[in-house]
Image: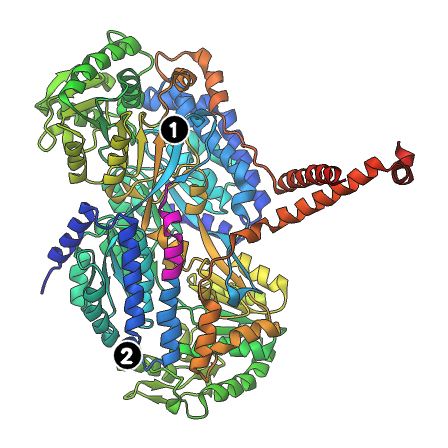
Amino acid sequence: MSDFSAEVNNLRNSFKEGVTKPIKWRVAQLKALDRMLVENEDKFIEALKQDLNKPVQDTVMAEIEFVKNDIISLLRNIDKWAANQPVSKSLVTLLDKPYIHPEPYGVVLIIGAWNFPLQLCLAPLTPAIAAGNCAVVKPSEIAPATAKVLEDLFPKYMDSKCIKVINGGVPETTELLKQKFDYIFYTGSTMVGKIIASAASKHLTPCTLELGGKSPAFVDGCANLEMAAKRLLWGKFNNAGQICVAPDYVLCTQETQDKLLPVMKKVLNEWYTEKPEQSDFYCRIVSKRHAERLNTMLENTKGKIELGGQVDIDSKFFAPTVVTGVDLEDSTMQEEIFGPILPMITLKGVDEAIEIINSRDKPLAMYVFTEKDSVVKKLRDNTSSGGFTVNDTIFQLAVEELPFGGVGASGMGSYHGKAGFDTFTHYKPVLEKDLSWIGEKMAFFRYPPYDAKNISLIKALLKNREMPSVPAFLRYLFVMALGAVIGFVCTKYIK
Amino acid sequence: MEAQEVEICRKAFNSGITRPLEWRRQQLDNLFRMMDENSATFVKALAEDLRKPEQEALCMEVDYVKNMIRGVTNHFDEWTKDEYVEKNFLTLLDETFIHHDPLGVVLIMGAWNYPVQLTFGPLPGAIAAGNCVIIKPSEISDAVSRAMAELVPKYLHPECFRVVEGGIPETTRLLQCKFDHIFYTGSTRVGQIVREASNKFLTPVTLELGGKSPTYICESADMDLTVKRLIWAKCINLGQTCVAPDYVLCSESVQKVLVPKALELIKEWYGENPQKSPDLCRIVNRRNFDRLSAMLDKTRGKVYGGATDPDDCYIQPTLVTGVDYKGDSLMQEEIFGPILPIITVKDKEEAIDLINSGEKPLTLYVFTKKKDVMDAFKLKTSSGSAVINDAIVHLSVETLPFGGVGQSGMGQYHGKYTFQEFSHQKSILVRDFSAFGEYLGSIRYPPYSMDKVKRTQFLIKNRKTPGFLSYIPHFAWFLVGIACGVGGYYLANNRELTRKYLGDYL
């Protein structure tokens, strides 16, 4: 088996030669990637059907369109984001030129996940290219059809000297991780995230880890239960629950649960009919191993299966399932479910919810369904999570300008939109110092021999002063005054 | 014992005491008072640890930290408030913003060369972000460490901010505890240890490390200013600065001018016998002195200066020419002392190749007047930071982030970057239950259809928000102004009207 050193070295040489630095090259690559998605939509749809039985519409929206939108935004902003950014000066640097120069890291490694096999490889890749890096993309072997399509198509569209797809399983990934990269971007489980972090530490390689956890959903009694149920269930059962930001479990009062259950039953029937295994709109579990994992979890639960529960390991089918009467030690509460099982835990109110949430690792997402501002504020200010969404689930990913990432055990770093470009960029501060005698005179005191008499002067010169900024109303006042003068003068002349 | 300290901080954090912004402001004010009221104590401790002259102890340590605190309090409201972000058609009716969460309990490990600056430097940002902090000063600068341990509990909340003193065993035990962020300043070797320890709990880290910061001096450089700034940067703290110019790259002709000017300047500043000058520090301890002394003994270059005194931990500011980039003893590791190797190169391309053959340094210096030389180094090399025509002073520009890249570190701080490093930018989306909002979002529900897909594509398509929208308020006020101008004209030319409306006032 190859140790991949040749491949990585080739990319490093391309980077050293400066191939990826010109904006033109980066723009050409992004456009090529866009063409690849447009011209091969059918191939991707077919691959995702094979890997996850993903409905056409899900593939188009969540995999292909998502990345195409990303590319539009990067193309629009790349000149602005890659340009030098001037910064405000202080008294001592008045004559100098301080600014921040964005530069790429070098050769980055992107490890994708299997649940959104296309999106989670390409959504990190696009900002990595925009920032000027070379990249190795390692798609998940658990979604082999998509991995194969990517491997076949990349050399036809992308610059192979700078961007490569390398496929393989655990042994290959382990070998790859022995190579030195300048940045590693990993999406997947917390357990493997630790292995990646450990490998990265050997070369002091910075990394972004998009991990997971159990994302709680607190449903308040006063929420619009029909809408809340729909949004909750869509977030849970889309992709058969195999989404890192799926609401993992529900916290609510007994009363709310009693009202929710019949609504949930109605909604699930509407969407997937009474025989979800025949629905065109319902995914499969990615592998038999994962289906078995979920089945074991369900078999061991001490809760009551209210809805669903039907499983067929051979076809990897797992019905949308809701379980009530679950306590914190239940089999469904030990690890991230990542499947279509929704445990419901009853409690007294939001304070108890906060206690439960804070007793566990910080989750990737947190959801609250309520119409009370006070409940939102309480949860938001007393817990921490990667993201926090009120009255919906997963929707936050549609807002490109909201950085997406975890905190604590759910990950480190973030991306999407500018946050993605920032992730793959080293912002190098540059100070171009003035050579004039004025500047030198102003800083005379720094040179020896030191004189104690200078100390108060030095303190005064270096003191951090709040530089005044023009508040908005002054700007409006100015504009209004200008209008008044013009109005007055014009009326005079017209008269 | 260390675990208990962390436990105390964690309990304090979980109680929510650090959340209110007023409380954080109060702690920042207390920290400022601590620095202000105990300036003399810190200056004395720095003299004990490093024989640091008062001017350096104030400008680069005590007052530097005071300025950092001022910077945080000046911008506190701006940094802690929620940041609103752009929406698309799908989320038009929703609220989308970023809220800054504290991380929890963070560990700040200081270094011994600027013990006050590097231990307390990250602290104001960490406090402003709402964290509890374990402060671990370096045991090598033990007078400052003791001063910190004594003073911090008197000014800052004793359960939220704790100083843990000690050496390797204490630090090792500390690193086995769970933190929500670790901020370390020091050597790359120990940085590696900290980074590996962080893997256990997936703790994010900021590592401010070191490396060999190269200095290129071009033929076009202003030699008088260059020599002053170069020698100043190399001699403060007796060269024990992470961003000191480590070695020089220049042509033979530049070297011919550089060496005599530099030696002359050293004499001018520090006298014939620099050991007697009150303005030079000492090497921090015997171990580091021995390391530098051995480096100097083994060099195959030509030594100008080189006097040492082991009992005084003194090394004379020394230049060494004819140094071989690859093989010399001075080029194997970061010098971190007052020895300046000068390596001759043909041209800037050779200099760039040499720099790129090594690890990415913490900073890069170029002395030149030519734009193409500046650009060549800036664009063809990578480093934590870069300065043209000076050295070290970029650390005083609060709006520039400071940190390394590659082996010289990860993460950045100073100014608002410290605040960001110690907080979690939590993305928040607030939707409501309005019928229209539901209508917009309902196309995602099964049963699916390609028509629904097309509608969703339309709604989420990335569109540029027209820039002119932000000028609407200005335009509105301008129209108001015109109306006032016109009205004012009529009033001014119509006495009856004026008398009627303003008669009482005229």
Q: Position of residue B471 (x, y in %)?
A: 58, 49
Same chain for mark 1 and mark 2? The answer is no
Subunit of label 1: B
In which quadrant of the rendered view does residue B55 lie?
top left
Subunit of label 2: A
Q: Relative to B221, is A262 on the left or the right?
A: right
Does residue A165 belong to the magenta stretch? Answer: no
- Residue B107 vs B434, above or below: the answer is above
- Residue at image position (50%, 21%) is A460
Question: Badge 1, how many Cα within 10 Å: few under 14, some, many 20+?
Answer: many
In which quadrant of the rendered view does residue A35 lie?
bottom left
Magenta span: A71-84
Mark seen at residue A51: 2
Nearer to me, B31 or A30: A30
Mark seen at residue B144: 1
- Residue B503 vs B9, above or below: the answer is above
